[in-house]
Image (cartoon, grey):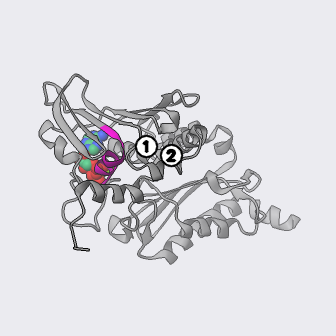
Amino acid sequence: MAIKQLTETIINQIAAGEVIERPASVVKELVENAIDAGATRIEVVTAGGGKNLIRITDNGSGIPSDELTLAVSRHCTSKLTDDVHDIRALGFRGEALPSIGSVSRLSVKSRTAQADSGFEISVHGGHMDGPRPAAMNNGTIAEVRDLFFATPARLKFMKTDRAEASAISDIVKRVAIAFPHIRFSLAGSDRTPLELAATGVGSAGMLERISQVLGREFPENALAIDAERDGVRLTGFAGIPAFNRANSLHQFAYVNGRPVRDKQIWGAIRGAYADVISRDRHPVVVLFLNLDPALVDVNVHPAKADVRFRDPGLVRGLIVGAIRQALGQSGIRAATSGAE
Ligand code: ADP
Ligand code: MG
């Protein structure tokens, strides 16, 4: 067979295979875009577990009408200049919108503060239409219908509406913890609505948001963490050992505001609690790591949930040390190990 260049739509669908695993991945990408745009209000509406409809409305900067076509084009981003090691935004790959548009019916409506009206562009299964004027407030409305209609093989892997809706709710909560100043809402036919009011700033705001998401009992049963080593700052809350759970879904870790699932971080948490929690139970922990973006590589996987630290030992030591110290100071270590 002769060698041919793949079409743009096929290239985007291949990327979608990596970036967009399920409806919750769409929600994550679109919510991250809203956060990067400086939004203070983000509304998520879904139907059919996000398979029928996902609509995200934000009050962020908006996209100028002459950039809408670029916004849904592959490898076009306003967030990366020329240094892949200095990534401050949540997005940077310019892949989410074109990927989503290649496998669904995507519409992006947007209006900047300077514009007299909004504009809308749509991409259905990779076919672009627009931009055309659209009435709306300042900000952006990204609407995704019939996710994976263009890739039926992927559609078959979707779980029940209920399971997909619950994954969406988890991702909204997970992201929201790191951005307490943003008001989040999640509504639609799928489940009971979630409403997270914007909180104050600083650690009080952080604690308030964590309570909104994890319930009031968590801060009452958690110890504050605040430590720093060689430019890496660790803050957050570590649940007391008695406040444990059957799975590790209640562990939240963020690197420069980005929710991550990182084996090294989970390993460090496990290590910190090794003496005080039995192996089949898991502590509830919320940890924020903040460090110079040059000291961590977030470009490890298209979905951006994995990270690589330049000095993993430092990060591990910091987490283990800070949690053990907090537990020790509150007398927990001594009490529990004495009882063993
Ligand atoms: P990335 O986030 O990696 O840049 P995306 O495909 O998610 O790539 O988005 C492409 C571009 O579209 C962004 O760089 C941004 O300029 C613009 N954009 C997308 N969503 C929004 C939004 N909600 N508000 C403002 N601009 C947006
Ligand atoms: Mg993005």
Query: Which numbered tag is attached to residue 260?
Result: none
Query: Along the horizontal axis of the image, is 279 left or right of 46?
Result: right
Q: Quadrant of the N terminus?
A: bottom left
**Cα distance, mark 2 to mark 1?**
8 Å
Mark 1 lies on a secondary structure that is helix
- Does the stretch in magenta take in 130? no
Q: Residue at x 55, y 42 (%)?
A: 164
- Tell me the magenta residue range: 95-106
The outermost residue toward the top is 135
x%, y% of residue 132? 16, 30
The answer to whether any part of residue 92 appears in the image is: no
Q: Quadrant of residue 113?
A: top left
Q: Which residue is mark 2?
A: 171
Cβ–Cβ under 8 Å for marks 2 and 1: yes
Ligand 2 neighbours mark 2 (CB distance < 8 Å): no
165 displayed left or right of 221: left
